[in-house]
Amino acid sequence: MSTTLTSKGQVTIPKQIRDALNLAPGCSVDFAVNCAGDVVIHKVGARASHEPDRFESARGKADIKWRTDDLMALLRGEG
């Protein structure tokens, strides 16, 4: 499997590798170089050691369709 390096230094991880490591958009990965000079990619562990995202519990919970102007007025105490 090969891929092409972009001018920004980015590469696309081939699907077979993403599937093997169970990588999804937003996953963190670590890169390392072993003794033989091979690049090794590891999926970063679960967020168990980090604080939970304080916004995650609220994400997708709104049941009112706010217009931006109305919401900003409310947040500013104008209405």
Image (tube, rainbow, N blue to C red):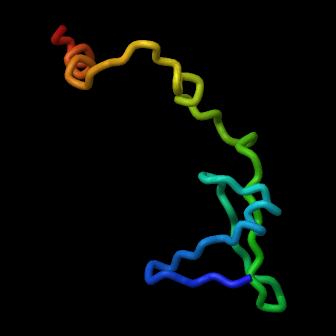
8 displayed left or right of 20: left
Q: Position of residue 20 (x, y in %)?
A: 82, 63
Looking at this rendering, what residue extends furthest in the top direction? 79
Q: Position of residue 42 (x, y in %)?
A: 76, 65
At x 25%, y 25%, the residue is: 68
64 displayed left or right of 1: left
Residue 59 higher or lower than 38, as above or below: above
At x 58%, y 84%, the residue is: 4
Q: Position of residue 23 (x, y in %)?
A: 72, 57
Q: Position of residue 69 (x, y in %)?
A: 20, 23
Looking at this rendering, what residue extends furthest in the left direction? 78
Q: Quadrant of residue 11?
A: bottom right
Residue 2 higher or lower than 20, as above or below: below
Quadrant of the drawing holding the N terminus: bottom right
- Judge by depth and name the residue closer to the eye, 63 or 47: 63
Quadrant of the drawing holding the C terminus: top left
Q: Quadrant of residue 21?
A: bottom right
Q: Quadrant of residue 53?
A: top right
At x 25%, y 14%, the residue is: 74
Residue 25 higher or lower than 38, as above or below: above
**Total numbered labels:** 0
